């Protein structure tokens, strides 16, 4: 396992792909608030410009990248809130993508998609599990990257 660094502007998205999963990593770019609705409450995530928004898809390829871009649009442009499902909710097994936002995010395949409200932990496919994504001094750092991943930086376009 190794690490990679990327200098992303706030109008860019970094895609990280394995054979079975895809990540979309976007710098917040400005102070913003993302709301997260849990079964009992609504939580406000106050993001700083260097914080990261990470979308984890449980598939790879063009369809997954387009889905990530669509979800990014809903979050960033429409300001749609995130939803956290209760433990053992039957809908969690049908989720195709999940989101987290923080300056450091750890990927894990040992949590149930959509049921974990801690925004520093994000569900992923097993190939990407254990990776850490950090924002540091204007750089996006990928730590513990598994061999064989593919990366691509592209413009966020709606």
Image: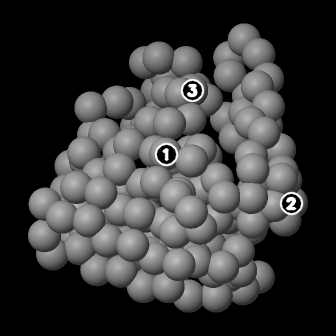
Q: Nearer the viewer, mark 2 or mark 1?
A: 1
**Distance in Å between CA atoms under marks 2 and 3:** 21 Å
Q: Position of residue 155 (x, y in %)?
A: 64, 88
Q: Answer with mark 2 or mark 3, whichever residue precedes in sequence.
A: 2
Q: Nearer the viewer, mark 3 or mark 1?
A: 1
Crowding at mark 3 (Cα within 10 Å: few <14, some 14-19, many 20+): some
Q: Position of residue 19 (x, y in %)?
A: 21, 71
- For image coordinates 83% across by 53% down, the residue present is 31
* SS label for mark 3: loop
Crowding at mark 1 (Cα within 10 Å: few <14, some 14-19, many 20+): many
* SS label for mark 1: strand
Question: What label does residue 117 carry, if any?
Answer: 3
Relative to 138, say whether 63 is above or below: below
| Quadrant in the picture for the N terminus | bottom left
- For image coordinates 74% across by 58% down, the residue present is 49
127 sits left or right of 5 in the view: left
Relative to 102, say whether 40 is above or below: above
Relative to 80, say whether 86 is above or below: above
Q: Position of residue 8 (x, y in %)?
A: 58, 77
Q: Which residue is mark 2?
A: 78
Question: What label does residue 104 carry, if any?
Answer: 1
**Distance in Å between CA atoms under marks 2 and 1:** 24 Å
Image colouring: one colour
Q: Nearer the viewer, mark 2 or mark 3?
A: 3
Relative to 155, say whether 82 is above or below: above
Residue found at the far top of this picture: 40
Q: Answer with mark 2 or mark 1, whichever residue precedes in sequence.
A: 2
Labels 2 & 1 near each other (Cβ < 8 A): no
């Amino acid at each position: 396992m190794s690490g990679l660094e990327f200098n992303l502007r706030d109008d860019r998205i970094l895609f990280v792909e394995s054979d079975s999963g895809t990540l979309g990593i976007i710098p917040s770019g400005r102070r913003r608030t993302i709301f997260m609705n849990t079964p009992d409450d609504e939580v406000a995530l106050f993001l700083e410009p260097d914080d990261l928004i990470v979308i984890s898809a449980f598939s790879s390829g063009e369809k997954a990248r387009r889905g990530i871009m669509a979800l990014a649009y809903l979050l960033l442009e429409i300001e749609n809130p995130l939803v956290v499902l209760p433990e053992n909710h039957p809908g969690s097994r049908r989720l195709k993508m999940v989101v987290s936002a923080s300056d450091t995010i750890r990927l894990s395949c040992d949590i149930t998609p959509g049921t974990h409200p801690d925004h520093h932990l994000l569900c992923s496919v097993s190939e990407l599990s254990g990776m850490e994504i950090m924002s540091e001094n204007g750089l996006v750092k990928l730590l513990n990257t598994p061999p064989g991943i593919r990366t691509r930086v592209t413009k966020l376009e709606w």
